[in-house]
Image (tube, rainbow, N blue to C red):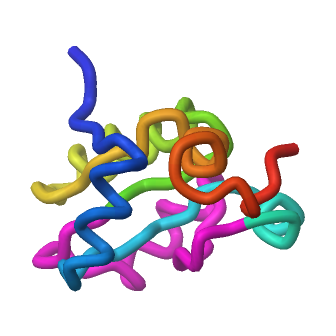
Amino acid sequence: MSVPEIQAEELKHRLDQGDHLFLLDVRDEYEYEISNIGGHLIPLPELSKRLHELNKREEIIAVCKMGPRGVKAVEYLQQQGFKKVLNLRGGIHAWSDKVDHKVLKY
């Protein structure tokens, strides 16, 4: 079973129209320093210890480099009772390719 996802272009559109979305960046800190789209950094290995930083009522978009860690984060959050959580399909690389070429790919 696949996890719910959002395309980079749709995320950009929703952010531009002012939708309240919580961007959860699950990459490592050094990756976040290379490039990011302004999300809240909680590396995937720390997610279980930092669930208190997330609000189950908010729509959460998991962001990683290319998608797989975001999928794992979505699956984990769903197991913890989060209902409104999506993976950014293709991660930061998709954002760079389709939305903002200034966001570095690494």
In the rendered image, the residue lying farthest to the top is: 1
Residue placed most toward the observer, 94 or 87: 94
Which residue is pictured at 65% across the width and 49% down the height?
Answer: 96
Q: Is residue 31 left or right of residue 78?
A: right
- Horizontal and vertical percent position of residue 35: 78, 65
Which residue is pictured at 35% across the width and 41% down the height?
Answer: 7
Q: Is residue 44 left or right of residue 9?
A: right
Which residue is pictured at 60% across the width and 53% down the height?
Answer: 44
**Magenta stretch contains residue 71:** no
Which portion, as a residue range, is magenta? Answer: 36-60
Residue placed most toward the observer, 13 or 74: 13
Seen in the picture, residue 4 relative to 74 is either above or below; the reply is above
**Magenta stretch contains residue 39:** yes
Q: Quadrant of residue 40?
A: bottom right
Q: Quadrant of residue 91?
A: top right
Seen in the picture, residue 16 relative to 84 is either above or below; the reply is below
Q: Quadrant of the N terminus?
A: top left
- Horizontal and vertical percent position of residue 93: 66, 41
Q: Quadrant of the C terminus?
A: top right
- Horizontal and vertical percent position of residue 24: 47, 67
- Horizontal and vertical percent position of residue 25: 56, 63
Which residue is pictured at 11% across the width and 77% down the height?
Answer: 57
Residue placed most toward the observer, 48 or 61: 61
Q: Is residue 28 left or right of residue 94?
A: right
Q: Quadrant of residue 83?
A: bottom left
How many numbered markers are drawn? 0
